[in-house]
Amino acid sequence: MTSEEKLLEARPTIIQSEKGGTSIPQPEADQGRLARTLVTAAAPAGFFVLFMAGWYLVSYVIMTPRRRFLMPPPHEIIAEGFGKSDNLIQILTGLWQTTRVAFLGLVIAIAIGLVLATLMSQARWIENSVYPYAVVLQTVPIIALVPLIGLWFDYNFQARVIVSVIISLFPIITNTLFGLRSADSSHHDLFTLHGATRMTRLRKLMIPGSVPAMFTGFRISAGLSVIGAIVSDFFFRQGAPGIGRLLDIYRLNIQMEMLYVAIFWSSMLGVVMFWGFGMAGNLLTRKWHDASLAGG
Amino acid sequence: MADTRHDAVDTSAPVLQFRGVTKVFPDGTHALSDITFDVRRGEFVSIVGPSGCGKSTILRIASGLLPASRGDVNLADDNIGYVFQDATLLPWRTVRKNVELFGELHKVDKEELTRIAQDAIDLVGLTDFEDHHPRRLSGGMKMRVSLARSLTLNPGLFLFDEPFGALDEITRERLNEELLNLFLSENFGAVFITHSLYEAVYLSTRVIAMSPRPGRLIQEFEVPFKYPRRPELRFEPEFAELTGRVSAALRGGSQ
């Protein structure tokens, strides 16, 4: 087997996706890439080791045994959160609840945001009438709205989704609108010269050009939708418990290990959502867009 | 204004006619003043002049992107090729899909369009680059894609707005050759805006010198050299003499 065949076997997705034929990676280039990957992986790994060492230092050296419960050492947290099946089921159930809220909230926010941004890109008067309210929605502290939304919608799943939508809508509108407006005037001239209709212009020029900015908005909103799901859950204190509710319960019961575990899972949810949209955006635009999105 | 125009190869109606065209922008900028000229098929007309003399405005008016304030503009056919200084490719489309764009906008039959696009790509020498995205092309190659895109509709008139202005000298000279070959094979009429007097004289059947704002036509120069033109033409005394006269006219008009 030649080295090139090995490469083909090792990295089928990359080879398949580049039809150009001129860009089959050379072994040297591949080694360079491997080295870079190692370096980029080594840096966070090194930081992780330092962080853990620091944690143990605080737990065992700085904290007196009486106060150690405030910052239990990592292995105890792992034993409590991952070793005991009751705890694990409880937290995964909560995580699933929160994930559903965040994901549905994000999907709805994306749908509303894309429609609004597209309408706003078509006429100034629509932008002028919608934009101020989008800003207000963004600037009102969401915490202030949570009790009201809870009262209106009976503190249930729906109410949580609504909070999640409200909090994640704005970045989708602004980034998509920015993207739709990003086409050069000379591109617009071309479409004008060739008699393009408004629809054609939108479909063939504005929307494809907006994809990178659109996905930047999705990524930001993905993180926000998780925050919305957790915050509403935390404040409602009713309905099927998600991570937010569990955070509160663990705090009240002084289950410190589980509190850390809940923080871990809720962060993971945000990271995965953020990363997922980063990857999706990259896959869609990496062939033509220079500034590949980070976080892939 | 001395009218030195001779009867062009094609004696039929002009593909583009400007009659006393004046342009004043809403902000009061007086861009063009009383512009009159014709372009026929088989004629290559370059317009030279100082920055801001309204050269590009002439093309925008000719194409219908801008209305004239006064005067008449006649286009024999709406089908025109307009090539900007920037290649204006859509970065998310491959070379092939970029070349197919205008055909798509004019609802050309799909199979037909694939064939036309391939012909245009071959004609500008981009065979085997069909599936590349613009990001991976050099400036000169992007400009070829832009030319190929306009060629698909086989326009009778081409408007060139400093298409090679951003390219290096060597690429520019090579594209000059290729453009002349296209001009000879496709026999379109062309209006070519440039800052380079050498480029203007080398390419054109006629060179028009313009004054600074408000842009007026100072003088027209017939270019007597026969096509096909050899690159060495640029270094011959007759070429230098004519270029010198255009330059002198521009300097006279600047005072």
Image (cartoon, rainbow, N blue to C red):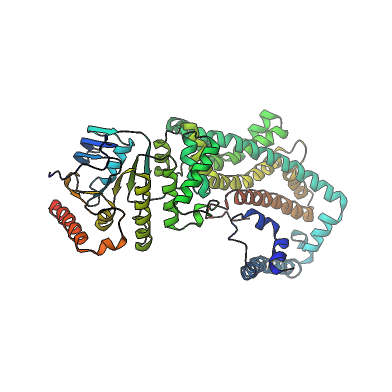
Q: Residue at x 49, y 35 (%)?
A: B108
Instruction: Say which quadrant the N terminus of chain A sits in.
Output: bottom right
Q: In this view, does B244 lie to the left or right of A25?
A: left
Q: In which quarter of the image is residue A28?
A: bottom right
Residue at figure coordinates x 14%, y 51% from the top left:
B253
Is B35 displayed left or right of A164 in the figure? left
Location of the C terminus of chain A by quadrant is bottom right
Of B89 and A109, which appears nearest the observer? Answer: B89
Splitting the image into 4 quarters, where does residue B151 fall?
top left
Residue A179 location (% of width, % of height)? 50, 43
Give the image location of residue A255, x and y in percent: 79, 53
Question: Is residue B98 something that shows in the picture?
Answer: no
Task: Give the residue at the far right of this rendering.
Answer: A85
Residue positioned 45% across, 58% down in the render? B138
Q: Name the residue rendered at 87%, 49% in the picture.
A: A86
Task: Decide if residue A25 is in sight here.
Answer: yes
**Left/right of residue B89 with respect to residue A261 in the rendered view:** left
